[in-house]
Image (cartoon, rainbow, N blue to C red):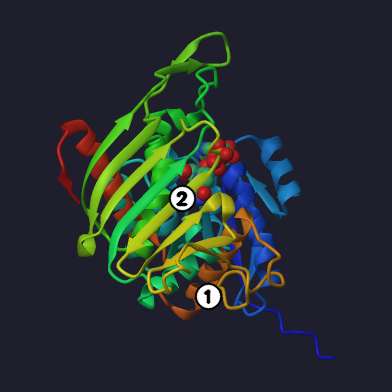
Amino acid sequence: MMPAMPKPAVRVGLIGYAFMGRAHSNAYRQVNKYFDDLPYEIEMHTICGRTPDKVQHAAAQLGWQHAETDWRRVIENPAIDVIDVSTPGDSHAEITIAAAQAGKTVWCEKPIGNTLAEAEAMAAAVANGGRMSAVFHNYRFAPAIAHAKKMIEAGKIGQIFHYRATYLQDWIADPAFPWVWRLDKDLAGSGSLGDIGSHVIDLGRHLVGEFTSLSGKLKTFVPERPDGSGGKKQVTVDDAAIAIAEMEGGTLATIEATRFAPGRRNYNRIEINGSKGSLVFNMERMNELEYYNAGDPEGLQGFRTINVTESAHEWAAPYWPSGHIIGYEHTFINLVAHAIRCMKSGQRMRPDMEDGLRNQRVLDAWERSNESGQWVKI
Ligand SMILES: NC(=O)c1ccc[n+]([C@@H]2O[C@H](COP(=O)([O-])OP(=O)(O)OC[C@H]3O[C@@H](n4cnc5c(N)ncnc54)[C@H](O)[C@@H]3O)[C@@H](O)[C@H]2O)c1
């Protein structure tokens, strides 16, 4: 048998090796193993962190060829094609803009910037660089979300009246939980708002349409936390965020993003109600999509649960036989597969930096509304 022709390589430089660094590394290791048809082979070239022994360990553990401690050297390396920005938000803009100016492709974590001004500068730099881009709103790539999108486009839900999003976590509900970078505005940009609210803003934009105006409130329940050395440190971001909003086509939306919902670990739930039916997705049961069809005969009406693991379900098919469920990590593998295809075909990658910017406009409007107490246009 003739050996298969090697595929051209896409060489990645990953900045950040912790939570997202591990999720992205897993996606890069797996993507060509499940998606046989991809035009390029991912090469895990360089991983970057600030502490030499830790980044060396991460390189060995996660499967990277080289370890680096200065992201500038990763960008300067002519062998590298893609810069993956998986650091906290305070360095996204600087790394992205430098990478785009050096002619690299940028795949960036969300929210893209810590401020709207940063996001605008990032999107402009990437547009000027002329390369495709990607933003890691990975939930778009859960098979249930892809199926919901198809059903909406096929008119199964009809006119959409409501987008109802509740992204609930509980990891800082205990006031004794120590201070971390996610609780600092300079490092994280915002709290629940940008961290998890941005994901359900993205799902709303993806499934329903643009947000046009909103009234939002932000709240910090625990203003200071143990700093790990006997003292206290200020919390300068929101612990919880709620908003009511209007979307294109007159859809009314409610969005809640909180880290103060005891018992809710990663309860990323959305519900869409339309003239012909409803759809419900909950990340904690990500292999299921609930569907109510208002056209079902009387006596048989009720929500049904679709197990989205059939070969007909996009982003489930490359894995296992029906009913053999997939997990959180597969959403990242799917996103990377899609990015590789878009890189080759020239089809616009969604979500890209432009999506990241539009998302940030909603975050910014939410913060302005919180400050002014007014309903604001987006
Ligand atoms: N898509 C998702 O579902 C999801 C989930 C969690 C976090 N995120 C996003 O991913 C990003 C990173 O979050 P995380 O949870 O992985 O954080 P983390 O704290 O787990 O990891 C951050 C990493 O960045 C490194 N780092 C920080 N500053 C650096 C610098 N100047 N140079 C090189 N490395 C640097 C740290 O050493 C660490 O390895 C954030 O933007 C966050 O919002 C996305």
Please tell me which residue is depicted at 26% across the width and 41% down the height of the picture.
366
Q: Secondary structure at mark 1?
A: helix
In-image side of 37 versus 303 (left or right): right
- Asked whether 336 or 44 is in front, the reply is 336
Which residue matches tag 1?
A: 341
Local crowd size for mark 2, using a 10 Å CA cut-off: few (<14), some (14–19), many (≥20): some
Please tell me which residue is depicted at 21% across the width and 38% down the height of the picture.
368
Please tell me which residue is depicted at 45% across the width and 67% down the height of the picture.
301
Residue 101 at least partly seen: no
Looking at the rendered structure, the kind of residue marked 1 is Arg
**Rounded to the nearest whole Å, what is the CA distance between mark 1 and mark 2?**
29 Å
Question: Foreground mark, 1 or 2?
Answer: 2
Question: Which quadrant of the figure contains the N terminus?
Answer: bottom right
For this orientation, the residue located farthest to the front is 299
Classify residue 171 by image quadrant.
top right
Q: Percent position (x, y) of residue 235?
A: 41, 22
Which residue matches tag 2?
A: 269
Please tell me which residue is depicted at 26% across the width and 45% down the height of the picture.
244
Which numbered marker is on residue 376?
none
- Asked whether 21 or 47 is in front, the reply is 21
For this orientation, the residue located farthest to the top is 230
N-terminal label among 1 and 2: 2
Q: Secondary structure at mark 2?
A: strand
Q: Percent position (x, y) of residue 137?
A: 46, 55
Looking at the rendered structure, the kind of residue marked 2 is Arg
Q: Percent position (x, y) of residue 365?
A: 23, 44
